[in-house]
Image: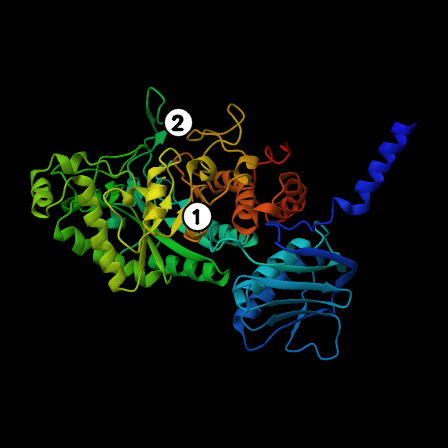
Amino acid sequence: MIKQLFILGWFLFISSGVFSQNEAIVPLPNYMVKKDGQFTIKSKTKIVFDQASDTLRRTAEYLNAAIALQTGFRLAFAGSSENDNNCIVLKLHAADSLGKEGYIMKVKPDGIEISSAAQNGLFYGIQSLIQMLPFKQENANQLAVNCIEIIDEPRFAWRGMMLDCSRYFFSTEFIKKLLDNLALHKINTFHWHLTDDQGWRIEIKAFPRLTSVGAYRKETLQGHKKDIPEIMDGKPYGGFYTQTDIREIVNYAGERFITVVPEIEMPGHAQAAIAAYPWLGSTDVPTDVATKWGVKPYLLNPFDTTFHFLEKVLSEVFDLFPGEYIHIGGDEAVKEQWKSNPEIQDKIKALNLKDENELQSWFIKRIQKYAQSKGKKIMGWDEITEGGAPEDAAIMYWRSDHKQPLEDAVRGNHPVVVTPQEFCYFDYYQAFPPKEKLAIGGYLTLDKVYTFEPVPRFCTKQQAQQIMGAQANLWTEYISTADHAEYMLFPRLAALSEVVWTKPDLKDYPDFVRRMEKLLSIYDSKGINYCKKQIVKCP
Ligand code: TNX
């Protein structure tokens, strides 16, 4: 009897809301206090904001679309709340300690107010409000929102996601859908991997063969690269983004407060470029665009003609992407071709360099100087620390099993974005075959992503400031469709969004899983093909 009473008491305790205080918002806001009562959004509710601002209008439209999805009606816009109580007010306030991405949201029984020092914060406030709406109600004539006060700001400035569009090409339509879904998770950086051995995907007007030749491969490897015998599909494959497509994507991303960081790989991962223009290569043997996966030997040569080429390419790239950073790759440049080319060896001697690593460092520094002269900063994979990275370059750390480059990057005062394979490689399995589609390997579960701590343990408080943030990488050797890409990204991206947004001491995996239920219904309403196997996994 006592035991039964205890169980009943425990049940009442839980259902009284002690454990369900948090609104189901992902990433979890950093301060959130539930208040009594509800505000009800009805057809006569207005969204109030400065009518002169097109940006605010777009943000208000974002909210309106989410409301219309459930109610079928759209709210009217107004310039001031006058004496009307029934309003959702979007307000810019003076700069404060929350910064431009922070926001304050107050839901009271008579209305909602979201305020921020900048448009970015208002947009994120709207994303939180969208997640607070009841979901899966069709033709609802009103939507009740719980009263609450939220004061929120992100932990990191770089909250990213990388998509490899070289190994497989993804349509602009898919990328737009992806950008919407990144915005839902308050991700603010889309790293666009546009060139690699298996395809050059960005139109460069000065060098048309980059796309007429470099964007197409003869065929593609089927199955895993380790499978024997190798099976090729025998079908030509390719595609590229025109500069018009790129502008459209950059603009679409900008409207969602997402910066697009393009990646143009050098000196390695350059086989497609060398196939298009053999004089860029380090051997006399011409090559084709790669048809199989894995690290390739083709390196750009370090002669002036290559730099003139790269400067022209980059000047077009700089014009297309307004962001501060451009990613120049720098990873996995095996140096065999440089080692066996006598002219390149002479160049190493003439420049008084020790070896090929120092030549790569010299190469990247030359590109950095050019970028700097155009007001841009470069970022590269952690291999650019080998032989010394240029002073103001940011480092993207990825090799979980090589800690040295991370330490070198931090100690060398470089800004660092961490994307270690162990936690951030979303091309890894989430479950195992035969039930799972083929993947590159590895094993990265939702709960493991959630446990990721971006600031390395060895960092002092001061060094921790150099960690700009983290991102998920989706390499696509084994991901050829939009549906599969979504399956690999979601819900793992939700876990990563909390890693980069929420203060570590507030993180709580069981609570995250509980909040995910709501987010999953939003995923359903948006037709996201997420992985359903992970979400039940709660330790
Ligand atoms: C390593 S991460 C690569 C990519 C591959 C990826 C597969 C990095 C900088 N280079 O070229 O696609 O592994 O996981």
Judge whether residue 207 can be spotted in this image: no
Q: Nearer the viewer, residue 55 or 353?
A: 353
> Label 2 sits on what residue type?
Gly
Q: Nearer the viewer, mark 1 or mark 2?
A: 1
Judge whether residue 72 can be spotted in this image: yes
**Left of 173 or right of it: where is 196?**
left
Identify the residue under disc 2. Answer: 223
The number of numbered discs placed on residues in the rendered structure image is 2
Q: Ligand 1 quadrant?
A: top left
State the residue at coordinates (77%, 68%): 110
Confirm or reject: label 2 Cβ below 8 Å from ligand 1.
no
Give the x, y percent position of residue 435.
Answer: 54, 25
Give the x, y percent position of residue 529.
Answer: 56, 41
Give the x, y percent position of residue 490.
Answer: 54, 42
In the depicted structure, whether residue 106 falls above or below residue 208:
below
Identify the residue under disc 1. Answer: 460
Going from the N terminus, do you reach mark 1 or mark 2 first? Answer: 2
Q: What's the CA distance linking mark 1 and mark 2? A: 45 Å
Task: Say what secondary structure mark 2 lies in.
Answer: loop
> Label 1 sits on what residue type?
Thr
